[in-house]
Structure formats: structure tokens, C-alpha cells
Amino acid sequence: MTVPALIDSIGWTLLHFVWQGALVGAATALALAALRNARPEYRYNLACAALLACLLWPTAELYLRLRGDAAVTAQMRFADTLFARGIGAGAGGVLAWLQSQLLWIVGFWALCAVLLTLRMALGLLWIRRTERSQVCNPHWQAVASRMATRFGVTRAVRLRVVDNLASPLTAGWWRPVLLVPAALISGMPPELLEALLAHEMAHVKRLDYLVNLGQNVVEILLFYHPAVWWISDRIRIEREQIADDLAARHTGEPRTLALALSELEKMQFSPQHLALAANGGDLLARVKRLVRPDVQAFNWKAALPVLGLAAACLSVVAHASVRHEMPLADLAPHADFRSCAKPQYPQAALDAGITGTVTLGFQIGSDGKVLASRINRSSGHRDLDEAARNGIAQCHFVPGTKNSRPVSSSWTQVRYVWVLN
């Protein structure tokens, strides 16, 4: 696998996820609307499955593109046709332009992914340093240990008091730790603080920290798609509701937890997405749900944009499927030589100071690779001729299409001029 081919596969996978993510997001929005009055566990599982689909769909496409056999090529070309129909008129020119920009697209994606990974690593480092540097409160550690026993948590749960923190939060799964703000220890009634700790213990019981880390990974890889962020946010909202329900069942006092959350709403805080904080989601909505749960009516006005997006995506799929079976305007192959690695000057010719020009004929196969090459006009030196043929073989182009199917091109030619600088 050459570097240009790898960049080509990654780039087109990223571009295709634009419409793939829109489809997943639209389907998820409709399904969540249908489950609006169901238990939060059902909505949570649905949102987690949708986020997993956002990861697996481009992963599977990238794997198939890297395989590059004939069956896979036909399958991927249908996806390219679908993407072209979504762009509309002038799709061939747009796709050719995108092909020429793949290096920049992949480079920008990689840079942003690295920066977001670094941000995540710094957040995890802060949590670990805070855990090690802060002191343990013996009284609240004993409360947390008794609570862990009631929740059926067999692992030891550590509790640390932190000065610069506005809400209790949970980190870790194998050795879980509860970070509690010092302001809550001194300023909140004990029964309210216990209710907040019960909420955090529910996260420990469910191993929510692992899912949260997985969310961060997906957000890093697919940061450019708003559907990923929306689905991930819905996971966090539903997860907080599940933890509220579990804490209320164990304490037997839903109103106490609601009062604790309302007190927490009065404090200034910033969300900790690398950990699980009690202030996650919409606090006022959570308070209302605990005190007075009600049936939610279906909001057709809010659903109209989602229905429109779903209809548009499905129409593109149907249009591409129909047109895939009908004669379409043929597209000429796009030969962008920026995808080619610089050919190596033969060492023997370099040492002897030999120069020359090779006129090379070549065909582009249906997979975008060079199918065949021949010497139309020799440089007079076999080493230079063979170096030119080896150079063209490393190129990867956009193949031409006929009736929307990739086809091999006719013979075209290029000149290699070998000069000594």
C-alpha cells in the first residue's frame, strides 16, 4: 500500500461520512422521538448503538477501500456515485477537485485529531494528578464505602476532596475515584451531598466511565460531523437520567436528589467531559423529571427538519440507485500527477551524467491504478526508460466511468524529462 493510495482511501472515507453521518443522525432523531416516553435506558442504548454505527460504518468502508479487490472496487464506486449525485450538477468536476485536495483534507483531519487527543490526554493527566495530590476525608470515605456496598459495587471506591471543583464527579473504572468539591463538604447539608454521591455511585455501578472514554475517542476521530456531537450529547443526557433513577431507587428519596441538583444549579460550573459529573445534562429538566415526571408530546415542528433531512438523504440514495442502472454521462479519467511519488533517478545514469526524455504511454484501470504502460519514445537509455515506467506505476488516479461504472481508460501519454541539476 503506497502513501498516495492510503491518503486516497482515508480521504474518501472521511468525505463519504458526511452523508453517512447525516443518515445515522436523522434515523436516530426519529427513533429517539418515538421513544420519548420510554425508559431512559432504551434511549441510551439506542444512542450508543447510533454512535457505534458512526464509528463502524467509515471503519468498514476504509477497510474495504484498502483491500481494493474487484468486488470491493465495484461496491465503493457505487458509494462514489451516490456521493456524486448528492453534489448535483458538475459532480465530475467537483469530485476531481476533491481528489486533488485529498492530501490537505487528510492532513487537516489528522492535525485536528492529534490536537484533540492531546487535549484528552491532558484532561486524563489532570484527573490522575488530582486523585493523587488531594487528601481523603475519613468521614465521607466511610459514607462512600457503605454506599458502594448498598449499590453492589465490589471494588474499592476512593473519595478525594478537591478545592477547585464545582460538582462531584467520577473517574476510573478498575479503581474508581469520587472527586468531591470542598465547597460542598462545608456548605451543603449532609443528606443532599449523600444524594449527589449516590448519583455518582450509580455511574460506578454501571461502568459509565468506559463508555464515556469511548465517546471521547469517537468525537476525536469524527470531530467534523455535527451528528456525532449531537448523538454523543444525547448519550450523556440519558446517562444522567439513568443515574438519577438508580440513585433515587437506592436512597428512596427522589425529592432529596432533586433538591440537591437544584442547589447545584445555583453554582457556577464547567462540564467535565472526561469524567462523569453530577451536573451533566439539563439540571432543571432533571429536577422536574424527578419531582413531577410527565408524558412528553411529540413535537412535529421540531421533527420537520429531521424528516426533511431523512427524506433528502433517502431520495439521494434512491436517485443514485436508479441512475446506477441507467445510461449516464461518461466521465473521463482524472489524471492528477500530484498523487505520484517522485521517480528515482537511476544511480548508474546519475553517476554517468546521462540525461534524456521518455515519452510514456499508459492506461488507467477501473481501480484508479496504472493498468499497463509502454515506451512510446525511448530516451536512448534503458535505465531511464525503466525508471519512468516504475514511476508511473506508483501513481493513483480517478478512473473514468461509463454508465456510472468505472472503466479502464484508453492509452494516454506523459513525458518524463531526466535532467541533472
Image: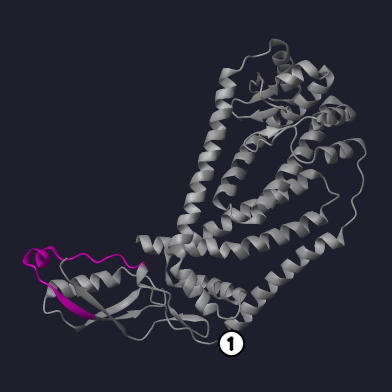
| Residue at the (74%, 16%) spot, across then down | 143
| Residue at the (59%, 23%) spot, across then down | 130
Q: Categorize mark 1 by other alpha carbons within 10 Å: few (<14), some (14-19), many (20+).
A: few
Q: In the shown orientation, is residue 262 left or right of residue 226?
A: right
Q: Which of the pair 258/207 is nearer the observer? A: 258
Q: In which quarter of the image is the C terminus?
A: bottom left
How far from the left and from the top, in percent, is residue 307? 77, 66
Is residue 126 placed above or below 17 in the rendered structure?
A: above
The residue carrying mark 1 is 326
| Residue at the (41%, 60%) spot, across then down | 6
Q: In which quarter of the image is the N terminus?
A: bottom left
Furthest residue in direction left, as rendered: 352
Furthest residue in direction top, as rendered: 138
Magenta-span inclusion, residue 342: yes
How far from the left and from the top, in percent, is residue 323? 60, 83
User: What colour scheme was applied to this rendering of the protein?
Assistant: one colour
Q: In the shown orientation, is residue 81 left or right of residue 310?
A: left
Is residue 256 placed above or below 50 in the rendered structure?
A: above
Query: Splitting the image into 4 quarters, where does residue 41 fall?
Result: top right
Q: What residue range appears in magenta?
A: 339-359
Is residue 351 placed above or below 191 in the rendered structure?
A: below
User: What amino acid is labelled 1 in the image?
Assistant: Met
How far from the left and from the top, in percent, is residue 26? 72, 61
Q: Which of the pair 171/351 is nearer the observer? A: 351
The reply to whether residue 69 is in sight is yes
Determine the secondary structure under disc 1: loop
The reply to whether residue 72 is in sight is no
